[in-house]
Each structure stands twice: as C-alpha cells, then as structure tokens.
Amino acid sequence: MSAAALYALLRKSVTICLDFDASKQRQRRPKEAKGGHMSTPSLSRFIRTNLESILDAWEQFAQNLSAEKNMEGGALREHAANILLAIAIDLDKLQTSVEQSEKPMGRAPPSAGEADAESNGTSRVSKDFSVNDTMSEFRALRASVLYLWSVINTVAPDTVDKPARFNEAIDQALTDLLWRCTAGTDRMTRWFDILLSSSPDLNCLTDLEGRLIYANKALTDLYGTHLSGVIGKKFSDLGRHSVPDLGQLIARVVATKTTCRGDLSYMLDSHAQASYEYLLIPVFDGGGRIEAVAGTAREVSERHAMLELATDHATYDKLSSLPNRALFFDLLKRETIRSERTGLPLALLLINLDGFKGVNERFGHEGGDLLLREAARRIQSRVREMDTVARIGGDEFTVILPDVRNTAHVGLLAQQIIDELGRPFTVLDNDIVISGSIGISLFPQDTGLPEDLFRNAGQAMSASKNTGRNRFNFFMQSMREASGTRMKIIGELRHALAQRQFVLTFQPIVDLGTLDIVKAEALLQWQHPTEGLLHPPQFIGLAEEAGLIGAIDEWVMGEAVMRAREWSALRGEPFQISVNRSSAELLSKAPLKRWDAQLTMMRSVWNCISIEFDESVLLHDLPWVRERLETFQLAGAQLSIDDFGTNYSSMSTLRKYHIDFLKIDRSFVRDMAADMESRTFAETIVAMGHRLGLEVIAEGVETAEQRDWLKMVGCDYAQGHLFSPPVSAQDFEHLLMA
C-alpha cells in the first residue's frame, strides 16, 4: 500500500470518529471567550478526552504496517495510548524559551514520559520493528491528533501554538524513542570494548593503509598513550619500531587477502627486548571485499627466555631434540604458575608407546631410536605452537597444553595423537604397527601441585593400558583409590607364596573317542585372606609388573611336576598336565630367573608336562622366544597354543615352532550351536591341525551337542564343565580312580 493510500485510509478513519465527536460538540456549543473567540480546550485535555476516538483510527492504520499485522489489537492500542498520554503529560509542562527552541532537536531535558519512551523503544526493537516502522507510528499519531483538533476547534489566538507544542512534544518523544532503540547496540559495543580492553593481549583494527581505527588498552599502554593518540596513525608513526615491520605485514595481508602470523620483537623503554607472537587477519565486507585488517599479539618473552635457559643448560633430549625430563618438570612448574596468573586451565598429557619394547628387542637400539624419533615428530605435528612436547625417558612423552578453554578439545587432540601413532612405522625397511596409551590430568581442577599433576596423568595412562591400550583417559579421583588398591595387592602378592595362599586346581581333559580322562590343565588361584578366591586375570598382570611372575611360575611348575609323577604312577603310564606360561615372560629378552630349576623338574617327568602359551607370542617371531620354546622341548615338555584362532597364526609359523597341540578358543565352541561361522571356523582349525600333524583340544565344552559335534569333525580332546569343573588335587585323583 502506498503512503498516499495509507494516509487516505487514516483520514477516512479519523473522519468517522470526528462525525461522532462533532455531533456531541454541537449539542454543547462552547461559550465565547472575551474578544469574540470561543474557549478552546487545551491540547493535552483534548488528547485525553478523545483518546478512544484517536485510538480507533490509529488501530486501523497500524494494522497496515508490515511489522504490526500479526499483533493483537489490544497490544496496539495500549502501546499508542502510552505514547499519547506521555505526550499529554509533556504538553501540560511549562517551558522556557530555551527549552522550546531546543526541544525539536531532541536536546531538551527528558520529558515526563522518559520511562515510556524507554519501554516503547525496547518493545519495538524486540519485535523487529525498523526505524521507519517506528517513525510511521508517530507520524500516524501526529496526523490523527492534528486533523481531529483542526476540525473540532476554530483557530483562535490562544490556540495557535498548541499544534506547534504538540509537534515539539512528539519530536521529543521520537528522539527519546530512537535513542532508546540504539541504546542496546551502544551497550553491546561498550561491552566488547571492555572485554578487549581487559585482555593482556594486544588487539587492533587498521584500515587498508595501515592506519589504526581501533586499539585496546594493552596496545595503547605499550605506546604510552590513549586511544585518541593512536587513531588514524600508522604503527611507524608511533615512535617505537618492531622487527619485522608491521606496516609491511599489513600491506601483505591486504594484497594477498590471507592471514599472516609469526614472531616480532619490541624494544621497551627499559631497553629490554619483548617478544610477541602476532596474527593478522583480513576483514571482509558483505560483498567479499577486504575492508580492514584485524590484529592480535601475545607476549611470549617468558617462554622464549625459558627456551634459552633450556639451551644453555643442555636440557634437551639428544635423540628426539625435545625437552628432557628435567626441563619438562621445570616448564611444567612455570606453566602452572602462569595458569594461576591468567586463570586459564592447563592440561598435561602423558603418552606411552604400546609395543615399543618388542620393537626395540627385535630391531635393537637402532630400530628403536628410529621409531622414537618418528613418534616424537608425529606428536609434535598435532599440537599448537604454544604447546610443549617432551620426552621424559624410554618410550614416554608428555605434552603441556596451556590456555585450555574447552576440555573437549583436549580429548580431541589426544585422539588425534593416538591416530597418528597407530599409523604404520617404517623401521629398517619393515612396517611396524604400535599404539599409544594416554593419560590426561587438568590443572587446577585435579590438583594444584605440578608433581601431583604428573602423578595423576600417570594413573590415567595406566588406566588406558589396563583397559585395552590404544586409548586415552582423563584422570578421576577413583583412579587414585584404584592405584592405592593396586599397590596394596602388589604388596600382598609378595607374601602370598611364603604364606601358602596360592592354590592349584585341575580340570580334566578327556579323549573324545573314549571319554576317558587322559590329561589335565593346572589352573592357578589365589586364596586372598580378605578378598576371597581371586582368579588369574585379577592378579597375574600385577605379578608381571612387580617382577613376581618368575617365582609364581616356579611354584606352579613344582606342584604340576609332583602331581604328574603321582598320577602317572597311579595309572601306570605317563599322565600329562598342561601348565600356563606368562606371555610377558616369554617375550622378554631379559634372562629368566629360576629357569634351570624348572627345566630340571620337567626332565624328571619326561612328556608329562605341556607348556601352554598365548598365540600372540608367535606373532613377533623373536629369536629368543623360539630358543626358549625349543629348550622346553629338549627338557621333555610338549607345546600347546592356548586360545587358538584369535590371532590368526599362519601354518608356516606353526611348522617353524614344532607345536604339539592346538586349543580351540572357548568363544568358537560356545557360539557354534547358533553361529554357522563359528562352527565352520572350529572345523577348519581341526582340519588344519591334523594336516600339520597336531592334535586339537576344544575348551569350554558345556553341552552334549557341542561334544558330539566336535567328535564328529574329528577333534581329539575336550575340556569343560560338561565333564568336570576345575577341582582340587584330591578330588581330581578320585576322578582318575572312578
């Protein structure tokens, strides 16, 4: 609708109201005042008297504004009424000649309706009114009131200035309202200025010529001036030069429309050198044209000083060129102090390379060093320039992450490092796959002390290793409790042998052809004085970590040899007992303690001991592993691969190690009734074993259906609860005699 048509509609609406009001006026003609003129009511009284008539016309007009079409009529009338009543109050107020002359320019003192102007302005801004919409409302009110006034009243000397007063009042109201409309924007601008001014970083905006159009307090303080002293000037005009030249850098950003970052230095008044990291970013308008350059810089003098100190004291790891353990703890302490000063949290990552020990043993120090250098490079490639990567010894690295604003980003970085370490490494022309376990601790959330921060990260890293490796964990208070429990168990393990707390049980292995018991597997348990009966997964890992596994293995071997001798005599023929050996012990290159004593025991019961070990031991193809297994065989023991099928050993590997038995993993036996794939896999293992001249033992047989199917496909032996659970030596002897 055009403005002319809109105004015509308004006039028509007002005329309807005027017809009604004029009829009432004719019924009571006002008396003539002195001088022959009729007495005319004041404009403020006129507005109050005819408020509803004015609002009737106003409502019809307002509904044609695009911003008001969806508003309720009651809300429209209330809004207009508030404005008119505020103006009426202002009209009642006496004015000086100065106030009268300044009011149309909006410079008079606030009117009595100031609060209404604020609420009306805020209301319109919140309802997405444009300035034009808001001004149209006022123009409609002006037209309604003046037209109604001119129709009802005859012009008299004392009424000439009333419309002028009304115009002045409405101008003042409009000025108040427009000021309130922009107050929100001004307030937001002020808040951003306060935010930037409170930052210790240097922040600025320049035009395309490099002249400053904004500078925060930190920047103006650096130059010893105020904002007015730098606006419109170039950095070269401010009397303190930087290296490199900022003007040239800004020109490069404008020319290339790309971000520019780097280091620069300033000579301070104290003649000290201040170092900064800077970032210059092009600012584009809505059309994609560069209109300004935004810049920020952070002082890094302290960090540079720390690095120089590190160089002077030779505190870098020669292999990786990273800070070593001593420097790491110094840097960690400094960063925690800085974190306390800035109020920004700090994160510490402790990284351990899973599988590095095997690589080092297989390829020697040369191969291990190559892997460590590449691992260091990969970790560094994922962190920020402000972060610190250190190698604290062996296969352990740390990353110090200052200024952490979101812990989710820390987890994301940890996963990126894990992904990098999971990619194959090339070591002496061999592709090697390792992984990384990471522990994360936060300062000051987890602790306020640097040494505790490192300890917490270590506990979180241990949790990552204990839950499958190749993952990260944030430190939790429960880990500290778990660590205490772990150390307690290790201490108790040291006394378990002397106090005869270990128990050996035996599970029968039957010949599927005759269902006779022909072998047994020795299974270790720990009768803990307070925790009850503990199974191997609950303590074997701790025994390996504490270096106790050798003594435990020797005790198990002694018990197994004694029972094998007794039961062979009872049966009148050799009776074989399977004994599990630790994978960690077999894979370790370190000399095995008590090795000779165990070999001597095995020779005394020739062919009565079978050594069981995990299939993963063969995957590394380490020469000392092959030598140890051959030594077992030379002592009269046979070899059995436990849980076969979970690591996919090749047929050539089985031939190379002269294995005697394959034990089908219980997971395939358990699922074979419902899972055709598991059944096929188990059948394949049996066929492959027989083709290689090996005998096959199925573990975890629980049902007659499983037993019969295994017998049908030619499996040689089976063990499981269908035949008997693990029992004591005395009960096992009764089974043999039954």
Image: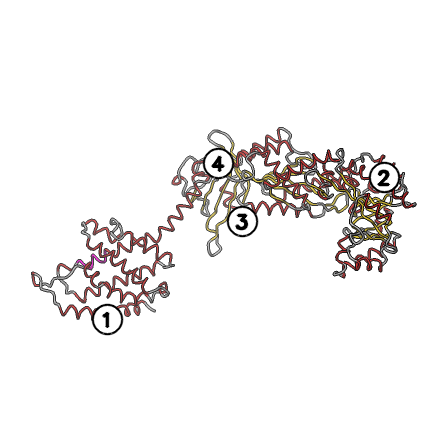
Residue under pointer 1:
16
Q: Provide the residue designation for mark 2.
A: 562
Q: Which badge, 4 or 1, comes first in the chain's sequence? A: 1
In the image, 129 versus 350, the foreground residue is 350
* Residue drawn at (29%, 63%) of the image: 77
Q: Are marks 4 and 2 in contact (CB under 8 Å)?
A: no
Horizontal and vertical percent position of residue 45: 19, 59
- Magenta span of residues: 161-168
Work out how far the residue at label 4 is from the one at label 2, CA to CA, in angstroms. Answer: 88 Å
> Which tag, 1 or 2, sits closer to the chain's start?
1
Decide: few, some or many residues near mark 2? Use Cα within 10 Å; few <14, some 14-19, many ≥20: some
CA–CA distance in space, label 4 to label 3: 24 Å
Give the amino acid type for the residue marked by disc 2 in the picture. Met
Q: Residues within 10 Å of mark 1 (few under 14, many from 20)?
A: few
Res. 258 mark = 3
Position of 728 with respect to 212 (left or right) is right
Q: Is residue 173 above or below residue 348?
A: below
**In 3D space, how far apart are the residues under numbered discs 1 and 2 (Cα atoms)?**
120 Å
Residue 499 on image: x %, y %: 75, 34
Residue found 39% across the figure and 38% down from its top: 226
Q: CA distance from mark 4 to mark 1?
A: 76 Å
470 on left or right of 54: right
**Within 10 Å of the Cα at label 4, are there few (<14), some (14-19), or many (20+) other Cα atoms?**
some
Residues at discs 1 and 3 in contact (Cβ within 8 Å): no
Residue flagged by tag 1: what amino acid is it? Ile
Specify the amino acid type for callout 3: Thr
User: SS at mark 2?
Assistant: helix
